[in-house]
Amino acid sequence: LPNYPLCSKFDQERKAC
């Protein structure tokens, strides 16, 4: 499993996951 929680699409765009 990835070590980041579910990210919003906004977070994904800013690569803040």
Image: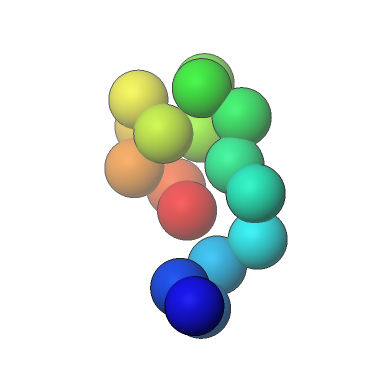
Residue at image location 51% in from the left, 33% down from the top: 11
Percent from the top left, x then y, of residue 6?
A: 65, 49
In screen coordinates, is 13 left or right of 16?
left
Asked if residue 3 is positioned above or below residue 15 in the image, the reply reads below
Query: According to the image, what is the colour scheme of the structure?
Result: rainbow
Q: Residue furthest front?
A: 1
Who is closer to the viewer here, 15 or 6?
A: 6
Q: Quadrant of residue 4?
A: bottom right
Who is closer to the viewer here, 13 or 3?
A: 3
Asked if residue 17 is positioned above or below residue 3 in the image, the reply reads above
In screen coordinates, is 3 left or right of 12?
right
Total marks in image: 0
Who is closer to the viewer here, 9 or 1?
A: 1
Residue at image location 47% in from the left, 53% down from the top: 17
Percent from the top left, x then y, of residue 7?
A: 59, 42
Residue at image location 44% in from the left, 47% down from the top: 16
In screen coordinates, is 11 left or right of 15?
right
